Amino acid sequence: MRINVVKENGGRVDIGSALIRNFLRTVDARSICGCPLHLSGGAAVVWRTSKKQRVGNLAVKTVAIKV
């Protein structure tokens, strides 16, 4: 199984969006208030969004799709 990232409208991801999305991986990896369970803030966002999007995806309006 492969995963592709596309814009929410089905278009291609431009270089600027890709850079922002990847920069925001640091937000996804941060733990919530130093919890010993190491729950990440990013995971909480994914659980709460209907399309299961990371923070970076929400910021640049992209989605990850299975191909």
Image: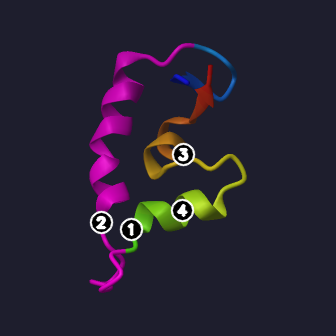
Q: CA distance from mark 2 to mark 4?
A: 12 Å
Question: Which label sits on residue 30?
Answer: 2
Tally of numbered discs: 4
Helix, strand or loop at label 4? It is: helix
Cα separation, mark 4 vs mark 1, equals 9 Å
**Pointer 3: what residue?**
58
Q: Is residue 57 left or right of residue 22?
A: right
Q: Earlier in the sequence, mark 1 or mark 2?
A: 2
Of mark 3 and mark 2, the one earlier in the sequence is 2
Residue 32, x across and y down, in percent? 36, 77
- Marker disc for residue 45: 4
Question: Given the image, on which type of amino acid does mark 1 rest?
Answer: Ser
Residue at image position (64%, 64%) is 48
The spot of residue 17 in percent (x, y) is 41, 28
Q: Nearer the viewer, residue 2 or 13?
A: 2
Q: Mark 4 belongs to which amino acid?
A: Val
Question: Does the magenta run of residues contain 33?
Answer: yes
User: What residue is shown at x 62% (from left), y 28% (from top)?
Assistant: 65
State which region is magenta: 12-38
Q: CA distance from mark 3 to mark 1?
A: 16 Å
Q: Amino acid at mark 2?
A: Arg
Q: Secondary structure at mark 2?
A: loop
| Left or right: 55 as drawn, with respect to 35 | right
Front-most of 52 and 7? Answer: 52
For mark 1, what is the residue? 40
Q: Are marks 4 and 3 in contact (CB under 8 Å)?
A: yes
The answer for how far apart the CA atoms under marks 4 and 3 are is 9 Å
